[in-house]
Amino acid sequence: MSSGRKLLIRGGRRIEGEIAVQGAKNSALPILAACTLCKGRCEIYNCPRLSDCDAACRILTSLGCACKREGNAVSVNSSAITSGEVSEKLMREMRSSIIFMGALLGRCGRCRMSFPGGCEIGSRPIDFHLEAFRRMGAKIHEEHGYIVCTAARLHGAKVSFPVPSVGATENVMLAAVLAEGVTEIHNAAREPEIRDLAGFLAACGARIDGAGTGTVRIEGVKSLGGCAYTVMPDRIAAATYLCCGAITRGEILLTHCDHGSLEPVASVLEQTGCSIYSFGNDSVYLNARKTLKAPDLIRTAPYPGFPTDAQPPIMALCTTLPGTTMFAETIFENRYRHVSELIRLGAKIKVEGQVAVVEGVNRLSGAELEAGDLRGGAAMVTAALFAEGTTKIGHTCYIDRGYEDIESCLKSVGADIRTV
């Protein structure tokens, strides 16, 4: 993945102001895939303007759906799906494209797609997905680099995952809503985005209980209709902007924000000495204009644990805090690709296997960096806001996959940031 666009950031300016948090990428993508199950028009509101969402819309169009975006609203009419196949080119544009497998298998009884692309942050096998589909009656084989799944009619089954998997939980939910009988998912992922997908499916007529808990029960229905639905706020974008406020020792108010889903990140930020307050159900305020210190240990874990996606920007913050922080990454084995770039800024970080030890420093200095994945790119932006001088960040196409106009958002709260 390449891009000629670069972000130029002059550090040392305090972040102060208000940001309205975008819709959640990790909700919008499975919800867009779920539209293929509906025999009617779906209106998706608060759908973030991201390259990944654009890729999902291109997939929908290639399948025969009528798909149109106006601002942050996407309209999808899947009444006349003509294909159950996603091309290799479209699959390679984003990792989450695999979520179309369960939806197409449920709607068309057949799907054919290659292995997905996306950020190279480690192994994300789809064995859980495929084994669940087999238990539901699908026949699966590979041909010329494609996975082909067929089922005259899926049936309910009991599915138990060895470890919680967000993608597999979503894929089974999508396949099960039109299957015959009842499907139970045990050791299901509990992320808020699972609840959001279930909320959309329920609005279309699906019968789902337990979404957001370890056991999800889906009773198949004969058909789904369209609906209007608003995507939840993006908790990872919110966490990133909180880190931007904290690293510059500033103040930031996030609106259109879900405080409850931010609790694991807010807890760590409070350990550093930041003050965090919630207002109602949709606003969060952070004040970091005080002496901060490094938290001792941050261990990523499935929700409600600390999210792996928030680890890179939190690590950027910790490089500037007095003391030592140990990071234990338990989700992805290649989630420290941003470390070498942070070191180029002057950070002190040592990595051994899945453990990283960060020793806080008093100053970082601007440098030329290259984003290698989405959240790593966010970490570089966060660190650059603190660094003395100018930092230039390339391969911003990765950042565009998850952050809606990050330049304008940060500029609005005082950052010196522009595109070159």
Image (cartoon, rainbow, N blue to C red):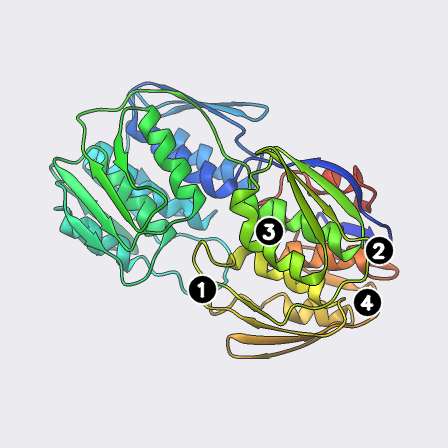
- Left or right relative to 105: residue 405: right
Look at the image and tell me whether residue 371 can be seen: no
Q: Earlier in the sequence, mark 1 or mark 3?
A: 1
Q: Are marks 4 and 2 in contact (CB under 8 Å)?
A: yes
Q: CA distance from mark 3 to mark 4?
A: 23 Å
Which residue position holds label 3? 398
- In the figure, 163 relative to 360: above or below? above
Q: Which mark is residue 11?
A: 2
Q: CA distance from mark 1 to mark 3?
A: 20 Å
Image point (82%, 57%), residue name? 290
Task: Find numbered disc 3 in the image and state the secondary structure of the residue it sits on.
Answer: helix
Q: Secondary structure at mark 4?
A: loop
For image coordinates 62% across by 44% down, the residue present is 238
Is disc 2 placed on a helix, strand or loop? loop
Residue that numbered label 1 is attached to? 331
| Inter-mark Cα distance, 2 to 3 | 21 Å
Earlier residue among tags 1 and 4: 1
The answer to whether the residues at label 3 and label 4 have Cβ atoms under 8 Å apart is: no
Q: Is residue 417 left or right of residue 327?
A: right
Three-letter residue code for mark 4: Leu
Between residue 297 and residue 196, name the one nearer to us: 297
The residue sitting at 63% across, 65% down in the picture is 338
Whether residue 322 is visible, yes or no, is yes
Mark 4 or mark 2: whose residue is earlier in sequence: 2
Q: Earlier in the sequence, mark 3 or mark 4?
A: 4
State the residue at coordinates (68%, 48%).
276
Percent x, y of residue 269: 66, 57
Residue matched to label 4: 364
Q: Residues within 10 Å of mark 4 (few under 14, many from 20)?
A: many
